[in-house]
Image: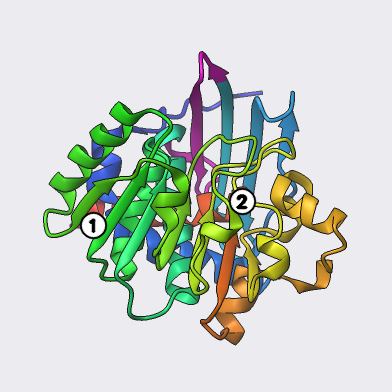
């Protein structure tokens, strides 16, 4: 049996990823993928979770084009810091061959920020002023960038458990968003007070802020927790929200500590809505709205498709 030799798929490094896929492109790509998933054109099996989330394997395939994405991640908490390593592989549906690979850490942060951008566009009021960011890592940075891609904020409040990390985050963010006013909050409660939109991107295992600290009208994105033992949101927020929207209902029922706790308090599962369904039907933007993401392969597929399209346009040009 003759085995053909195939060229190794090119690897896209961090610098090229950022130049290929600006934040606005990522937001649009993820929005398109969510629609594809909701309408049944993407096949997304349950993710494989090993050792309480230390190893994750996620995949998605487009039913008509057969284009597919596979991502492997290892996630370790070492000395209070989270380390994420992994690889994303994109397979061409026409040939079955790998088209490219991408380092998974930045890729995951990009698509996670993008899905919060989509949710913010769908759920937050049109007119906003204040954005609160809880966290100071790569995920927090793409939350900021993606939310600013869909809304015009004036003030950004940042909170991190380590003051120096928060200040470094602000210093770097000012370079990307020179027209915004930044401040470092002394507590999470102070950070979310008076916010129009809140983004939580931490590895917290207990609520970051008190429910009473939230304004009566606010949209909250929570993307940091992805294990049942993790939680960023206060008890009662989901229960009392105007609407709770999930990137992947099945995934959140399995992996979100916040969602599982709400269900244990007899919150109706039928009241949990997928982002794709809300994008299709629309929703009233008032009160406290919540978007919870544990990550799903459809988001990876969306950004992977955007990369594949950009690479194709470069070749054709």
Question: Mark 2 Cα within 10 Å, few/some/many (few <14, many 20+)?
Answer: many
Task: Pick the quarter of the image with the C terminus.
Answer: bottom left
The answer to which of 123 and 206 lies nearer the viewer is 206
Q: Return the residue at label 2.
A: 233
Location of residue 299 in the rendering, given as x and y in whole percent from the top left corner? 53, 54
Q: Are marks 1 and 2 in contact (CB under 8 Å)?
A: no
* Label 1: element kind: helix
Q: Seen in the image, is 227 located left or right of residue 21?
A: right
Asked if residue 276 is positioned above or below residue 98 in the image, the reply reads below
* Label 2: element kind: loop
Location of residue 36 in the rendering, given as x and y in whole percent from the top left corner? 58, 69
Q: Return the residue at label 1.
A: 316
For the magenta stretch, what is the residue range? 77-103
Colour scheme employed for the rendering of this structure: rainbow
Query: Gap in Å between the C-alphas at discs 1 and 2?
Result: 47 Å
24 inside magenta stretch: no
């Amino acid at each position: 049996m003759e085995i053909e030799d195939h060229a190794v798929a090119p690897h896209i490094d961090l610098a090229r990823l950022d130049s290929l896929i600006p934040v606005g492109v990522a937001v649009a790509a993820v929005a398109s993928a969510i629609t594809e998933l909701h309408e049944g054109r993407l096949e997304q099996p349950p993710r494989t979770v090993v050792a309480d989330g230390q190893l994750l394997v996620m995949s998605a395939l487009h039913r008509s084009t057969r284009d597919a994405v596979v991502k492997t991640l290892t996630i370790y908490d070492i000395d209070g810091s989270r380390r994420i390593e992994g690889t994303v592989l994109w397979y061409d549906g026409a040939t079955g061959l790998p088209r490219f690979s991408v380092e998974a850490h930045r890729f995951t942060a990009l698509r996670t920020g993008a899905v919060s951008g989509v949710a913010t566009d769908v759920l937050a009021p049109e007119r906003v002023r204040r954005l609160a960011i809880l966290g100071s890592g790569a995920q927090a940075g793409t939350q900021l960038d993606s939310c600013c891609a869909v809304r015009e904020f004036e003030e950004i409040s940042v909170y991190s458990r380590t003051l120096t990390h928060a200040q470094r985050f602000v210093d770097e963010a000012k370079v990307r968003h020179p027209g915004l006013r930044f401040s470092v909050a002394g507590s999470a409660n102070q950070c979310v007070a008076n916010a129009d939109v809140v983004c939580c991107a931490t590895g917290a295992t207990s609520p970051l802020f008190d429910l009473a600290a939230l304004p009566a009208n606010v949209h909250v994105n929570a993307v940091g927790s992805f294990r049942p033992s993790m939680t960023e949101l206060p008890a009662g927020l989901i229960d009392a929200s105007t609407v709770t929207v999930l990137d992947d209902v099945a995934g959140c029922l399995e992996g979100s500590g916040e969602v599982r706790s709400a269900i244990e308090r007899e919150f109706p599962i039928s009241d949990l809505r997928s982002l794709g369904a809300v994008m299709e039907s629309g929703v009233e933007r008032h009160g406290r709205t919540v978007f919870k993401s544990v990550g799903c392969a459809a988001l990876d597929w969306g950004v992977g498709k955007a990369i594949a399209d950009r690479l194709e346009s470069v070749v054709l040009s």
